[in-house]
C-alpha cells in the first residue's frame, strides 16, 4: 500500500495537473449549454422556452431555433432542462455535463386543442382563461358549408344566435351572443375580427322604408349580403368565439356584445412548395312545403248561377259575370264541371268550356334544385426565415329560384419574414369580388315571388304565365291574366332584376420587434374597405310601377385601424410569472352612399337615370366615425395553477358629446386549475373553475349630439330633423358577471363546460316620443335597463376510440332569460324596437326586448277562435301580446364518425319556443 502510494506520488503530479486542467476546461464548458430546437419537420423553432427546472434560469430560442443557456457554476450533472412551447409536448432532458443538447419537439394534439386566440390576437392556453370561449376549426366550417360560412356555426356554439331573413343565396346574418343587451336593434351585433382587423358586418338596405302591401307604390327590400359573407371559408384556420365582456373588454365599445375572432391560414416554414386543391359541391332544395288545398278553385265564394250553385267564368259568358279577376280560391269545388276558363293561346277566354281541375305542380314547379360549386387552389412554402401562402377560390351559385344566384372570386396572400433575430414582419390580405345578375326580393309586396306564391290559385296552370308579356306589348304590358295586384312570376324572376358588384379588401401589416427575451413591441395597421354597386330594375306594367322604375346605388365603406402593443414577460420567482401589455388603437371609418332614382321611365326597357320621365332624384348619405383608445392587460400565473387577468381600457368616441365621450371600463378574471391545486380522484383528468367580472361601454350612431339637416326631395334644399338631439347623453354601460366550471374525465374521454352569466345594461340610448308641439316627433335620451342572465353547457365525449374507428360527440345547450327592468319616464307603456307588416316588437317593463304585439285572434271564453260570417277570423279592436320571438332554449348535437380514411358528420340543431311572424 505504501509503495503504491509512493508510485502515485512519484508520477502523479503531472497527472494531477492534467486532471485539474481538464476539470477546469469542463467547468468552463459547463458555463453554458447550447443547441437547437426543431419541430417534426426539422425546421428550427423560434420562441421555445428553455428552462432549468427548479430555478428561474431560462431563455427562449432565436429565429433559427438556437439557444444558449447560461447555467453558471451549477452542478450540471444533476440539473434538467425543460423545453416547452404552446401546442407541443414539453420535453425534459438531463444535462449530465453536456454542453450541447439538440431537441425535437413533437406536437401534442391535446395541448393544441387548448390554445386559444383571444382579444388583440394574443394566444393563450385554454387553462389560463378566466372566461368562456369556444373555438371552431376550419374542418368544422367546411363540412357541408353554406353560402355564408357563419351559418356553419349554428348548433356548435352555446349561446350563439344567428338571425337571418333567409332571403336569398347571400343570406345576410346578424350574430348575437347571449341575448340582446340594447333596446337599439342595431346595437346588439357581435364584433367580427379578421386577422386582428375589425370588420363591418352590418347591412346597407336597398333603401326601402315601407314596402308592405300590394300597390303600396314602394319597392321591395333586397338582401345584398353583409360583410361577413365575403370571408372565404377555405382560408379560415380557426374561429374563436369570445362571449362575455371579460373576454372582449380589450376590444372596447365595438365588442360590447361579444366577438368572433377569425384567424386565416399562414404558410409553413417547410422547404419547398406545397399545393392544395379542393372542390366542394353542395346541393339545396326547398326543405318543406306548406299544406296547400287542391279542392276548390279560383273565386270569391259569392258567385252563384240560377240554380244557386257556385260557378266560374273567365270573363263574362253565358254562364254569368266574370269571376276570374280575383286572387282568392273560394270558387267551386273540383267535381268534373266544365267552365269557360283562360286560354293561353288567345290570352283570353277559351272558345269552349273546359274541365275544371286543379294543377298540383303550379307552385312547386316554379322552383329548381340549387347548387354551389367551389374550387380552391392554395400554395404554401418557405424556409427557415420566411413563409408564404397564397390561395384563390372560385364559387358559382345557382339558387333555387330561376335566374338567381351569385359568383364569387376570393384571393388571399399571407407573408411572414424574420428580418433578423429581433425583427419579424408579416402581412395578410384578403380580397373578394362578389357579383350577381339577380338576387331575389322579399316582402309582402307585388315584386316578391313569395307574394305570388301565396296567391297562386290551384285552378291556374303555372305555364300560362311563361310568355311574360301580352301579345305585341313586350316590355310594356306584362301578362297578368287574373288579379291586377299579382305580377307575373317569370317577369319577377327575369325582368325585375337586382344586380350587385362588390369588391371587398381586408388586409394588415404588422411588425414585432424583440428588445430582449422579456420585452417586445407589436405595431400593426390594417384596412377593411368595400365598394359596392347595385341596380334595381322594374319594367313597365308592374302593379307598383306602371311606367317602370330604376335605381342605382353606390355604397362605400372604408375603415383603418392602427394599433401598438408593448409587452413584458418575466418569471418573478420559481412559481410566479408575470405578463403585462400596454397598447393603443386609432380607428377611423368613413361611409359613403349615393342613391339615384328614376321613379318613371320614358322608353320601356332602357334602364338609365337619363331615361327618367322626371328629373332623377339623387340622395347622398355620408358619415364619419372615429374612436381613440388606450388599454392595458396584466396576467399573473401562480405555479401554473392559478391565473389572474386584469384589464383596463379607455375609449374616446366621436359619436358621443364632447363632455362625455371618454369612458373607462375594467375587467378582472381568474382561472383556478382545480386538478393541479387539489388531489382529485384519478377519474378526473382536468378540472378548472372560472370567475370574472367586467364592465364595457357602448356608444351610438353618428350625428346625434347636434342639429343636422337632412336632404329633401327638392334639389338644393334641406329638411329640419324630426328627432331632437341631445348634447349631454352618456354611453351605454354593460356590466357582466360570469362563473364557469370545466372538467374532463376518464383520460379526456368526457368533458364538460358549464357557464352561468349575468349581464346588466344601463344608460340605454333611446329615441322616445315627445309632444309634437315641440317641433320634434322623438328625442334622444339615456334611460332604461335590460337584464340578461343564462346558462351555457358544452359536453364533449369520445364514446369510441380505436386505431381504426372513432366516434366524437359534442352537445351544446343554452338558455337566456331577457328582462326589461326599466324604461324612460316619457314612455307611457312601450318602447318600439321594430315593426313589420301588422306586427310590432315592443319592450315593456317586466317584458323582454323581443316581445311581439299584434291583433291576434278574438277568442271565446273556452279559448276557441271566433269566426265572422265570411269565414275569416274576427279581428280585435286593439293589439295584444302575441309571444316572444326568442326561444326558451337552443341546442345542438354534433357527431363525427371516422373509419380509417373515411369520415361522416351529422349535426342536429334547433330551438324550443319562440314566436315567428309571417305575413
Image: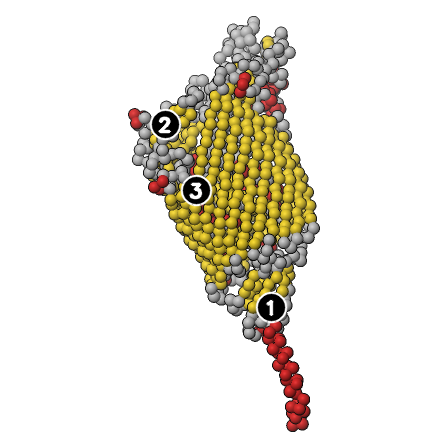
Q: Position of residue 620 (x, y in %)?
A: 46, 27
Left or right, 316 with respect to 821, comes to: right
Q: Residue at x 62, y 24 (%)?
A: 365
Q: CA gap, disc 1 to disc 2?
A: 76 Å
Q: How many marks?
A: 3
For label 2, the SS is loop
Q: CA gap, disc 3 to disc 1?
A: 49 Å
For label 3, the SS is strand
Q: CA gap, disc 3 to disc 2?
A: 27 Å
Q: Residue at x 40, y 43 (%)?
A: 652
Q: Nearer the viewer, residue 363 or 232?
A: 232
Dot 3 surroundings within 10 Å: few (below 14), some, or many (20 or more)?
Answer: many
Q: Nearer the viewer, residue 324 or 34?
A: 34
Dot 2 surroundings within 10 Å: few (below 14), some, or many (20 or more)?
Answer: some
Q: Which mark is residue 627?
A: 3
Dot 1 surroundings within 10 Å: few (below 14), some, or many (20 or more)?
Answer: many
Q: Which mark is residue 33?
A: 1
Quarter of the image for the N terminus: give it: bottom right
Residue 9: quarter of image: bottom right
| Residue 774 visible within the image | yes
Instruction: Judge whether 48 appears above or below 430 on screen.
Output: below
Which of the two discs, 1 and 2, labels the residue nearer the N terminus?
1
Which of the two discs, 3 and 1, labels the residue nearer the N terminus?
1
Q: Residue at x 49, y 55 (%)?
A: 567
Q: Which mark is residue 741?
A: none
Residue 894: quarter of image: top right
- Look at the numbered discs 3 and 2 and tell me whether their residues touch, using CB distance below 8 Å: no
Residue 495: quarter of image: top right
Q: Position of residue 769 (x, y in %)?
A: 34, 30
Which of the two discs, 3 and 2, labels the residue nearer the N terminus?
3
The residue to which callout 2 is attached is 722
Q: Position of residue 740 (x, y in %)?
A: 46, 52
Amino acid at each position: 500500500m505504501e509503495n503504491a502510494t509512493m508510485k502515485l506520488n512519484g508520477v502523479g503530479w503531472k497527472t494531477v495537473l492534467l486532471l485539474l486542467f481538464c476539470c477546469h476546461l469542463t467547468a468552463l464548458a459547463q458555463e453554458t449549454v447550447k443547441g437547437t430546437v426543431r419541430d417534426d419537420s426539422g425546421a428550427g423553432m423560434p420562441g421555445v422556452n428553455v428552462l432549468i427546472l427548479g430555478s428561474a434560469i431560462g431563455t427562449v430560442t432565436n429565429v433559427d431555433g438556437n439557444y444558449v443557456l447560461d447555467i453558471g457554476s451549477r452542478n450540471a450533472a444533476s440539473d434538467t432542462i425543460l423545453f416547452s412551447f404552446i401546442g407541443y409536448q414539453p420535453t425534459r432532458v438531463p444535462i449530465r455535463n453536456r454542453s450541447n443538447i439538440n431537441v425535437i419537439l413533437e406536437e401534442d394534439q391535446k395541448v393544441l386543442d387548448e390554445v386559444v386566440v383571444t382579444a388583440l390576437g394574443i394566444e393563450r392556453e385554454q387553462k389560463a382563461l378566466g372566461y368562456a370561449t369556444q373555438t371552431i376549426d376550419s374542418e368544422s366550417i367546411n363540412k357541408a358549408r353554406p353560402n355564408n360560412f357563419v351559418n356553419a356555426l349554428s348548433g356548435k356554439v352555446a349561446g350563439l344566435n344567428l338571425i337571418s331573413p333567409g332571403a336569398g343565396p347571400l343570406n345576410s346574418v346578424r350574430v348575437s351572443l347571449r341575448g340582446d343587451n340594447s333596446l337599439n336593434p342595431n346595437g346588439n351585433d357581435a364584433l367580427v375580427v379578421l386577422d386582428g382587423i375589425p370588420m363591418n358586418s352590418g347591412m346597407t338596405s336597398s333603401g326601402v322604408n315601407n314596402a308592405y302591401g300590394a300597390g303600396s307604390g314602394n319597392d321591395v327590400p333586397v338582401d345584398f349580403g353583409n360583410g361577413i359573407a365575403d370571408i372565404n371559408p377555405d382560408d379560415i384556420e380557426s374561429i374563436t368565439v369570445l362571449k362575455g365582456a371579460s373576454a372582449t373588454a380589450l376590444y372596447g365599445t365595438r365588442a360590447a356584445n361579444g366577438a368572433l375572432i377569425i384567424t386565416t391560414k399562414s404558410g409553413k416554414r417547410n422547404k419547398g412548395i406545397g399545393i392544395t386543391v379542393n372542390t366542394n359541391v353542395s346541393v339545396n332544395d326547398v326543405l318543406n312545403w306548406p299544406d296547400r288545398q287542391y279542392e276548390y278553385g279560383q273565386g270569391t265564394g259569392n258567385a252563384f248561377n240560377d240554380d244557386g250553385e257556385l260557378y266560374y267564368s273567365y270573363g263574362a259568358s253565358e254562364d254569368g259575370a266574370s269571376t276570374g279577376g280575383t286572387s282568392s280560391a273560394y270558387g267551386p269545388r273540383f267535381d268534373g264541371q266544365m267552365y269557360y276558363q283562360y286560354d293561353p293561346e288567345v290570352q283570353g277566354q277559351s272558345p269552349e268550356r273546359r274541365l275544371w281541375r286543379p294543377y298540383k305542380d303550379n307552385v312547386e314547379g316554379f322552383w329548381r334544385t340549387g347548387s354551389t360549386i367551389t374550387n380552391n387552389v392554395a400554395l404554401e412554402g418557405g424556409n427557415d426565415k420566411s413563409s408564404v401562402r397564397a390561395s384563390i377560390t372560385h364559387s358559382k351559385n345557382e339558387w333555387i329560384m330561376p335566374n338567381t344566384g351569385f359568383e364569387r372570386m376570393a384571393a388571399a396572400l399571407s407573408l411572414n419574414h424574420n428580418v433578423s433575430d429581433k425583427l419579424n414582419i408579416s402581412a395578410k390580405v384578403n380580397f373578394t369580388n362578389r357579383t350577381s345578375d339577380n338576387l331575389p326580393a322579399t316582402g309582402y309586396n307585388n315584386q316578391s315571388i313569395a307574394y305570388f306564391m301565396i296567391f297562386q290559385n290551384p285552378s291556374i296552370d303555372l305555364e300560362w304565365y311563361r310568355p311574360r308579356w301580352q301579345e305585341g306589348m313586350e316590355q310594356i304590358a306584362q301578362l297578368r291574366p287574373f288579379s291586377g295586384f299579382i305580377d307575373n312570376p317569370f317577369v319577377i324572376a327575369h325582368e325585375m332584376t337586382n344586380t350587385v358588384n362588390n369588391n371587398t379588401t381586408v388586409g394588415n401589416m404588422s411588425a414585432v420587434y424583440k428588445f430582449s427575451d422579456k420585452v417586445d413591441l407589436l405595431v400593426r395597421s390594417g384596412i377593411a374597405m368595400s365598394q359596392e354597386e347595385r341596380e334595381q330594375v322594374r319594367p313597365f306594367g308592374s302593379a307598383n310601377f306602371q311606367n317602370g322604375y330604376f335605381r342605382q346605388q353606390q355604397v362605400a365603406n372604408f375603415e383603418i385601424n392602427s394599433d401598438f402593443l408593448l409587452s413584458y414577460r418575466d418569471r418573478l420567482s420559481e412559481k410566479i410569472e408575470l405578463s403585462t401589455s400596454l397598447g393603443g388603437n386609432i380607428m377611423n371609418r368613413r361611409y359613403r352612399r349615393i342613391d339615384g332614382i328614376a321613379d318613371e321611365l320614358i322608353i320601356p326597357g332602357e334602364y338609365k337615370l337619363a331615361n327618367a320621365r322626371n328629373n332623377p332624384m339623387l340622395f347622398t348619405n355620408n358619415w364619419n366615425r372615429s374612436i381613440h383608445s388606450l388599454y392595458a392587460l396584466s396576467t399573473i400565473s401562480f405555479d401554473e395553477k392559478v391565473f389572474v387577468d386584469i384589464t383596463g381600457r379607455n375609449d374616446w368616441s366621436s359619436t358621443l358629446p364632447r363632455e362625455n365621450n371618454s369612458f373607462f371600463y375594467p375587467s378582472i378574471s381568474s382561472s383556478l386549475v382545480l386538478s393541479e391545486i387539489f388531489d382529485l380522484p384519478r377519474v378526473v383528468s382536468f378540472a378548472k373553475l372560472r370567475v370574472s367580472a367586467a364592465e364595457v361601454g357602448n356608444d351610438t350612431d353618428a350625428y346625434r349630439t347636434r342639429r343636422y339637416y337632412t336632404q329633401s326631395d327638392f334639389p338644393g334644399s334641406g329638411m329640419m330633423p324630426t328627432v331632437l338631439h341631445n348634447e349631454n347623453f352618456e354611453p351605454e354601460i354593460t356590466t357582466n358577471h360570469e362563473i364557469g366550471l370545466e372538467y374532463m374525465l376518464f383520460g379526456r374521454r368526457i368533458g364538460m363546460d358549464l357557464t352561468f352569466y349575468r349581464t346588466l345594461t344601463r344608460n340605454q340610448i333611446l329615441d322616445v316620443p315627445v309632444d309634437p308641439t315641440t317641433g320634434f316627433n322623438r328625442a334622444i335620451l339615456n334611460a332604461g335597463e335590460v337584464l340578461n342572465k343564462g346558462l351555457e353547457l358544452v359536453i364533449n365525449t369520445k364514446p369510441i376510440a380505436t386505431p381504426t374507428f372513432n366516434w366524437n360527440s359534442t352537445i351544446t345547450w343554452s338558455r337566456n332569460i331577457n328582462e326589461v327592468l326599466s324604461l324612460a319616464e316619457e314612455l307611457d307603456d312601450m318602447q318600439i324596437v321594430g315593426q313589420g307588416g301588422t306586427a310590432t316588437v315592443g319592450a315593456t317593463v317586466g317584458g323582454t326586448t323581443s316581445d311581439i304585439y299584434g291583433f291576434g285572434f278574438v277568442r271565446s271564453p273556452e279559448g276557441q277562435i271566433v269566426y265572422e260570417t265570411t269565414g275569416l277570423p274576427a279581428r280585435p279592436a286593439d293589439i295584444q301580446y302575441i309571444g316572444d320571438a326568442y326561444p326558451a332554449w337552443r341546442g345542438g348535437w354534433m357527431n363525427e364518425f371516422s373509419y380509417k380514411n373515411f369520415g361522416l358528420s351529422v349535426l342536429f340543431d334547433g330551438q324550443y319556443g319562440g314566436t315567428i311572424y309571417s305575413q
